[in-house]
Image (cartoon, rainbow, N blue to C red):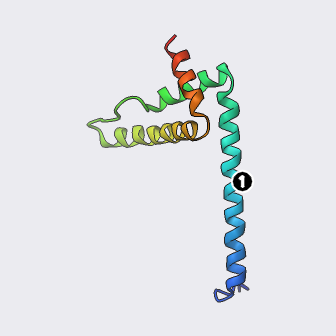
Amino acid sequence: MSDHDPLDTSSLDKARKDVSTKDKLIQQSEAEDIRWLMSSKRGRRMVWRQLERAGVFRLSFNTNSMAMAFAEGARNEGLRLLSLIHANCSELYATMLKEANE
């Protein structure tokens, strides 16, 4: 049997706050990690390769629906990475583009 009381709002509020704090720490860590990675030329090369492999800059249409679903999953992760870059170090995105076109 569980000791969980669904009517005990104080413990529910505490649990929500704990989850919220943990989520904020994870987001903060992720932001710091992407800034660190994008701060070096080597890191920007790695990120650019990931974005290209994920298919962020191309269509994922395929007549085979399973192949297209797979490609869209990879593209979704690439878009997530691109979103992290724009949210945390957008000035380095332009640098990465310039370096990739050289």
Residue at the location (56% across, 22% down)? 96
The residue sitting at the front extreme is 91
Q: Is residue 65 above or below residue 47?
A: below
Q: Quadrant of residue 35?
A: top right
Is residue 101 found left or right of 37 in the rendered image? left
Q: Is residue 94 above or below residue 99?
A: below
The residue indicated by pointer 1 is: 25
Residue at the location (50% across, 30% down)? 51
Image quarter hosting the N terminus: bottom right
Is residue 2 found left or right of 56 in the rendered image? right
Residue 59 lies, in percent from the top left, at: 34, 32
What is the three-letter code of the residue carrying label 1? Answer: Leu
Number of marks drawn:
1
Residue 34 lies, in percent from the top left, at: 65, 36
Determine whether the residue tagged by mark 1 lies in a helix, strand or loop: helix
Residue 43 lies, in percent from the top left, at: 65, 25
Residue at the location (69% across, 51% down)? 26
Residue 24 lies, in percent from the top left, at: 68, 56
Camera-side residue of 73 and 80: 80
Residue at the location (66% across, 20% down)? 42
The residue sitting at the left extreme is 63
Residue count near mark 1 (Cα–Cα under 10 Å), binned few <14, some 14–19, many ≥20: few
Q: Quadrant of residue 20?
A: bottom right
